[in-house]
Amino acid sequence: MTLAEIHTRVLACTACPLHLGCKSPIPGEGFDGWTGEYDVMFVGEGPGAEEDQQGRPFTGPSGQMLREYVDDVISTSRLFVPYYTNVVKCRPPHNRDPSPAEIRTCQHFLNSEVLAINPRVIVTVGRFAMMQFLPDALITQVHGRPQVVLGRVILPIIHTAAALRRPEYIPLIKRDLALVPRLLETPLETQEHKITIL
Ligand code: SF4
């Protein structure tokens, strides 16, 4: 399935109750006008109030913060093309956590996006996104520790929403994001299981 087909299906989805409480499901998005391949996929938990209004992922305060930090890495280190998406595509009411059933129902969209985009690196933003790839991990222990899962590099980072409440997380998030250019340059075969490059 192409990315365009996935986006069309997301926009029309009514498969779980989350669609009842949001303005619209929100597909992933990348660099405006980009029609080639994406290098790095950023996966968050779900849309918030601002995203729901705008119909775009990672556009609320914490999403803008992440985009700003990613742009800093791109401008100072290495050009890569980011793609932003979420575990669930509809805003959970009152920003509650998505339920396991809702995550399972929406999972096929994320799987399809990964297959269509074929990203070299997947950055999981926060606990819920991390759990899709590293179900037994603890975010406080594994953030900034890239791992190879099914042939892709997974880099868990702390959610920028947490940094809005606890600014002491900001240097950790920036440090972890700074790993992305090196992960893109390191051959996958040398990135056995757990990589220690800090
Ligand atoms: Fe469909 Fe996902 Fe929205 Fe549920 S959260 S309605 S599965 S797009």
Image (cartoon, rainbow, N blue to C red):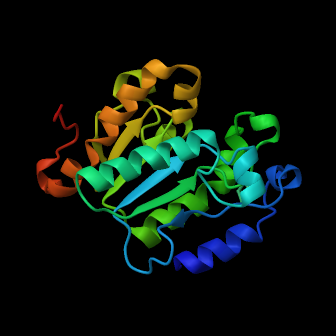
Query: Quick check: 170 left or right of 49?
Result: left
Q: Tell me the quadrant of ligand 1.
A: bottom right
- On screen, 75 above or below 115? above
- On screen, 85 above or below 171? below
Instruction: Tell which of 149 and 65 is nearer to you.
Output: 65
Quarter of the image with the C terminus is top left
Residue at figure coordinates x 70%, y 39% from the top left? 98
Residue at figure coordinates x 16%, y 56% from the top left? 185
Instruction: Tell which of 108 and 2 is nearer to you.
Output: 2
Residue at figure coordinates x 35%, y 42% from the top left? 155
Residue at figure coordinates x 72%, y 48% from the top left? 50
Question: Is residue 150 something that shows in the picture?
Answer: no
Expressed as whole percent of the image width and height from the top left, the position of residue 90 reads: 73, 53
The quarter holding residue 35 reads bottom left
- On screen, 121 above or below 130? below
Expressed as whole percent of the image width and height from the top left, the position of residue 180 reads: 28, 48
Query: Quick check: 3 left or right of 187?
Result: right
The quarter holding residue 184 reads bottom left
- On screen, 50 above or below 166? below
Residue that protrudes farthest toward the right in the picture: 20
Query: Quick check: 72 left or right of 60?
Result: left
Expressed as whole percent of the image width and height from the top left, the position of residue 160 reads: 52, 34
